Amino acid sequence: MKRVWVFVPPRPVVSGGMRVLVQVARQLRAQGALAGVLCWEEPLAEASDLPWQAARSAPLAAGDVLVVPEGWPGALTLGVRAGCRLVVYCQNWAYLFHGLAEGVRWQDLPVEFLAVSQPVAWYIEQVTGKAPAVVRPAIDRSRFHPPAAFPVPHPLRVAFMPRKNKAMAEGVRRIVAERNPHLAWQWIPIHGLDPAGVADALRSCPIFLATGFPEGCPLPPLEALACGCLVVGTTGFGGWDYARPVEPEGMLPQGFSLRPVPWGGNGWWVADGDMLGAALALERAAACLEGTDACQQVRAAAWETAAAYDADHQAAEVAAWVRGL
């Protein structure tokens, strides 16, 4: 079996992308393929169980596999010197060229790609001609799950993430208030919370507004689906890995086709940047809350969606990727 090294870049705050790298490293360790986790600075305290090593002194060897996230092509030199097989794990299509010097083409480099979702894999293949395997993130369904009883939608609590396109979220808020002065809305920002706090906040809200762009495989809307929220808004493109429209007017990028999935419509999805469309979608989701059967159908699709993004599914994808190395 190949020995795989995973490089985790230094960041002042632990990001969702770093947590996914840690997830993949743990899956590799469970399957006996992890050689070590490389860092330039201090290891992540929340992942102290992993075999961390200083990147510059780690014993990489010819034939090993080095996984580096997009945006850090300089770290690939660690593997070049040792004769490693080089893999760029792209978690956001928009950052594919970040850090890559002007005039340097991915097609000219001895690298392979691993993608976090089908949309990202499609994008990479269109741009570079290289078709990557896919390893998706996993959500903790013991933490992100529906409430024992769904919250009463009066007043209507809407969760959103201010750091994900704050201007769009504010615009949607103003539009629905302008159009629906008779309705009481409560806007619940998901910010500065640990994962348990995020899950509690989502369970307290019947609706989640997604405004992120660009995205690779956005976790907040997926976690909201797992918590029983009706999700409205944008996918950031990468969210089309799991997003399926309740209504047929969801917008897909030109040339992109949705992969077959067993679940049906799980949200009111609109084109990225469509502020008015998101506001109208929010109104339709709010109306759906008043119809028990329709609401239950959407929530059932949401739970089926979330079930496809657990640790077992991720383990199978990691195993398939390792077998193909």
Image: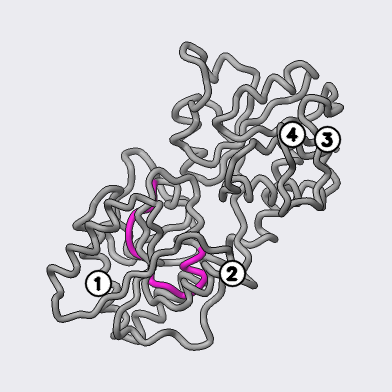
Q: Residues within 10 Å of mark 4 (few under 14, many from 20)?
A: few
If you read the primary sequence from the N terminus, does the residue marked by circle 1 or circle 4 appear first? 1
Q: How far apart, in angstroms, are the residues tagged by discs 4 and 2? A: 36 Å
Look at label 2 and name its amino acid. Answer: Ala
Q: How far apart, in angstroms, are the residues tagged by discs 1 and 4? A: 47 Å
Callout 1 secondary element? helix
Where is residue 126? Give x, y as percent: 45, 30
Residue 2 appears in the picture as rendered: yes
Look at label 4 and name its amino acid. Answer: Leu
Look at label 1 and name its amino acid. Answer: Arg
Q: Residues within 10 Å of mark 3 (few under 14, many from 20)?
A: some
Q: Residues within 10 Å of mark 1 (few under 14, many from 20)?
A: some
Callout in the foreground (3, 2): 2
Left or right for 244, reference 48:
left
Q: How far apart, in angstroms, are the residues tagged by discs 1 and 3? A: 51 Å
Tag shown at residue 325 = 4
Q: In this figure, which residue is indicated by the disc labeled 1?
A: 284
Callout in the foreground (1, 4): 1
Q: Nearer the viewer, residue 40 or 62?
A: 40
If you read the primary sequence from the N terminus, does the residue marked by circle 4 or circle 2 appear first? 2
Callout 3 secondary element? loop
Q: Which residue range is magenta in the image? A: 223-236
Specify the quadrant of the image occupied by residue 6.
top right
Q: Is residue 299 magenta?
A: no
Q: In this figure, which residue is indicated by the disc labeled 3?
A: 3
Q: Residue at x 30, y 85 (%)?
A: 154
Residue 265 appears in the picture as rendered: no
* Residue 111, above or below 232: above
Left or right for 316, reference 302:
right
Q: Nearer the viewer, residue 20 or 3?
A: 20
Q: In this figure, which residue is indicated by the disc labeled 2?
A: 196
Which quadrant, please, contains the N terminus?
top right
